[in-house]
Amino acid sequence: MSYHIVSIHSPQCVLSCRDGQLTCQAADGERKLPLEDIAAIIITSFAAQIHSELLLAAARHGVALILCEAFKPASLVLPANRSTDTTLSRALVRLSPSARRQLWERTLDAKCRNQHALAARIAPADPQTAALARAARSRRPHREAAGAKALWRVFGRALGEPRFTRARGGGGLNDLLNYGYAVLLSTVLQKLFAVGLDPTFGVSHLPRERCTPLAYDLMEPFRPCVDGRVFQWAREHPRRADWTVSPEYRKWAARLPLEPVPYRGCSLAIQNCVEAVVRGFRRAVLAGRPALYHPWTPGNSRWDG
């Protein structure tokens, strides 16, 4: 498949196709890119006009269009021949129990290491930071739960909230975290659809109605990115009254996918890092080789303290 995944963010733009090239006309000018170099087009613009000529040209070139509402994929437009190509889906469904276990172990290892890196950055002297280090090195089956418990203790104490507990409907910091995770989930879903992975087939999270377990699986190592960003917001807004999902916070949290993070020796925006991870997962599934999947960790970045 072609390599480029193009994201259209301009608030108002006109998308068309001329001479085999995707053309985007926006307030800041016109940009073009050959359709033959594009794998998918993600449209998050709130007021984009799409010419039918682009839909037909995209179909001829095998390009998928992902239309988003509030940044979450709402519609997937696929060429007829690509929509019936189930090679990747079959490979995902037929993963052996051993391969699934290895993919999930790699995911958990990365998540635990990232939680420890975040704790070491915000509260290196907290006793629970050492507990997180042990969880990151552990092979015990419950290390994820132990790591999460330790992280939220560090997180709360560092913000002067020693009684803080993570709860979906807990209000305050919990609401800020939930909104940040929703932004992250939308980013992961965009990239999954763009490379042709069906998010309804996960490797650990269980499928439920209107659920996308694969997105929940692959977003796990990126959750500390959200945690760190919420911690930053709370530090800069110490009044508890500001710990609400206000329009100001929504605008601030929406920039999460553009935050730079280190990945395998270079610096990438989180959304590009997610894409790299998803592509690696895709290769691992098709080849039946879990080692090709490299979940995100901060490596030798400032997160390592």
Image (spheres, rainbow, N blue to C red):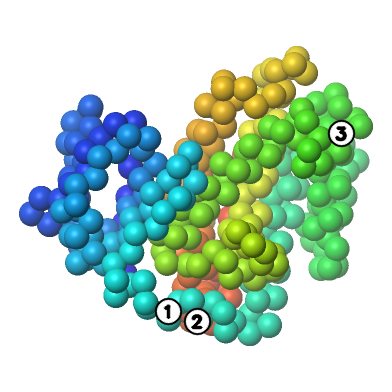
Mark sitting on residue 214: none
Q: Which image quarter is the C terminus in?
A: top right
N-term-proximal mark, 1 vs 3 = 1
Q: Amino acid at mark 1?
A: Thr
Contact between marks 1 and 2 (CB within 8 A): the answer is yes
N-term-proximal mark, 2 vs 3 = 2
Q: Please state which of residues 290 and 1 is positioned toward the viewer in this rendering.
A: 1
Kindly state the secondary structure of the residue where label 1 is placed.
Answer: loop
* Crowd tier of the residue under label 2, counting other residues whose Cα lies within 10 Å: few below 14, some 14–19, many 20 or above: few
Circle 3 is placed at which residue position? 164
Percent coordinates x, y for residue 130 in the rendering: 86, 47
Residue depth check, mark 1 versus mark 3: number of the one nearer the observer: 1
- Up/down of 84 relative to 26, above or below: below
Q: Amino acid at mark 2?
A: Arg
- Up/down of 255 relative to 289, above or below: above
Circle 1 is placed at which residue position? 86
What residue do we see at 43% from left, 46% from top? 68
Circle 2 is placed at which residue position? 90
Contact between marks 2 and 3 (CB within 8 A): the answer is no
- Up/down of 147 relative to 254, above or below: below
* Residue 218 visible in image: no
